[in-house]
Image (cartoon, rainbow, N blue to C red):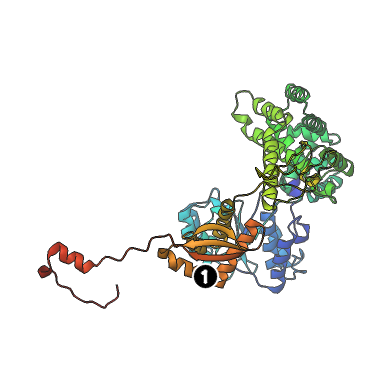
Amino acid sequence: MPDSSPIALYRLWRSKRFSDQVGQDAISSALRAQVRGDTITHAYLFSGPRGTGKTSTARIFARAMNCLQPEDGEPCGRCAACEFLENNEGIDIIELDAASNNGVEAIRSLNERVIYAPNFVKRRVYIVDEAHMITPQAFNAFLKTLEEPPLHAVFILATTEPKKLPETILSRCQWYAFHRIEPGLIAERLELVARAHGIPASESALGLIARAADGGMRDALSLLDVCRSIGGEITEETVRAMLGAADPQTLFTLAEACAAKDASAALTLVNSAFLSGLDPQELASGMALHIRALLVAQAITDGLPRMLAVTADEAERYRAQSSRFRTDNLLRLLDLFSQAGQTNKWNADPRLSLETAVLRACVPDDSLQLEEMAARIDALERMLASQPAPASTLAIPGEAQSVQSAPPSPPVSPVSPALSTSPVSRSETPSDIVETVAPPVDPKKLWVKVNDIIARSKPGLMAQLRRGVFTGTRDGAAHVSFSPDAIHQADYIRNNPANIQAVEDAIEQAFGSRMRLSIDADPGAPAPAPKPDIHQQAFDLFSREKVEVVENDAPF
């Protein structure tokens, strides 16, 4: 028989024990361990999204710490303390709504009451909901009480925005962060509730409710309550009608049009959905979630139905369509539809942002092609620059003509041999080239690369090396000349084996072959100018009789 209780489902199914909590196992285990070991502290902070069980956990914890015969950290529900709290919870378990009691006067009243002992149980528990709404002045008035409350008092602060709490409050509390509940776990609890109350509901409908709840059990139970009020079996169409969301077929068809780059079909579908009453912002948000599901289908192999809270057949449908897209295209579509869902409400015509996103999704992204082409060209140039120029021929698969050296010129006018190459098709890739004739590379350009390599690894060494001048490579060495006024920089490099090693490693990386570093003196550089005699300059300026020289050995 269907249950006709006027009490909301989320109130009827509020957890009474830690084991009833869904998706917060780590927190439940930690609190139960404190009850078992009687290591209850004076202040706790429960933070997390709405509907994830913060207040329910606080109530269970309050009963468990006062239970006379706790069962593995759980309240037994049978002892005198449990029965008293069940019937008189408001006496020794006090809940405060900080949204309406957030001022200094409310906190001052709490400070005055906290000194009184509980009526029947061991500890009086104060549960402060929406704690982030308390004003800074009220928090300052609360600090002393929160830091050193009476032994019988325990505070549990609950909030959805812990960042708004002062550090002085956070440092005085044990902090437990609640997270969103997985859609699969929510769907399992909804199925249990539906069976218990005789509510006919399809598996796909419960999965859709679980996904729409965004990780909140209370929101899922409230939506199930709304859907059952219509009467009859709860189907996926029923839930979508309540949510105003697009049906899966519309989303799959629109995604298929984007994959085929069929702008006409995509715009026709958007217009039909709009005329049928579907909000364009909801369609954009639905497409963003659909693209996310395709990305998940590409990324994982096992557990897809549970990850997406769908049936096995629906999961295979997502996986099949995901194969129609490259990952980078899906990421681009996700950005397009996410932005359309956010900006739609600011447009005069609500279809504008969605239609713009659809058109962009159906047009090839030239910028990505250009970036990919530029990356390939850059990789090819680096490969050619790193290879020494061979003296042999160039052979390309599929070409009948081979590259041969031209006959030598007459002795009266000797010239270098010339190479004649056959045309290279643009479709050929670097891996098809057996042997490449690289153009000669200017050693000075390669030395600039040496400087860049050293600058990234040893900036101090680079500052000294820049004082020298690269004069070329000969006799298996790279020669750097230093002028007489840079002799200290030359010695800094020459006398330190680690510096020599670093420069030679950079030379090998840039030139493609191992060479030693040769530090030379620059004979053509002028000798450093002699230091000026400041005494003589003073004599010339003021005359010797007016200048007194005082010797001072003290350091500056």
Residue that mark 1 sits on: 494
Identify the residue at the far bottom of this view. 553
Task: Write the residue at 10% across / 70% down.
Answer: 545
Element carrying mark 1 = helix
**Screen quadrant of the C terminus:** bottom left
Q: Position of residue 511 (x, y in %)?
A: 64, 56
Task: Compare residues 411 and 440 and report the one nearer the observer.
Answer: 411
- Looking at the rendering, which quadrant does residue 157 occupy? bottom right
- Looking at the rendering, which quadrant does residue 211 occupy? top right
Task: Compare residues 427 and 179 and report the one nearer the observer.
Answer: 427
Badge 1 density bin: few <14, some 14–19, many ≥20, Cα 10 Å? some
Q: Amino acid at mark 1?
A: Arg
Task: Write the residue at 65% across / 43% down.
Answer: 412
Q: Position of residue 471 (x, y in %)?
A: 53, 57
How many marks overall? 1
Q: Is residue 278 above or below residue 314?
A: above
Q: Position of residue 428 (x, y in %)?
A: 79, 40
Q: Is residue 486 above or below residue 197?
A: below
Q: Is residue 481 above or below residue 497?
A: above
Task: Write the residue at 61% across / 60% down.
Answer: 507
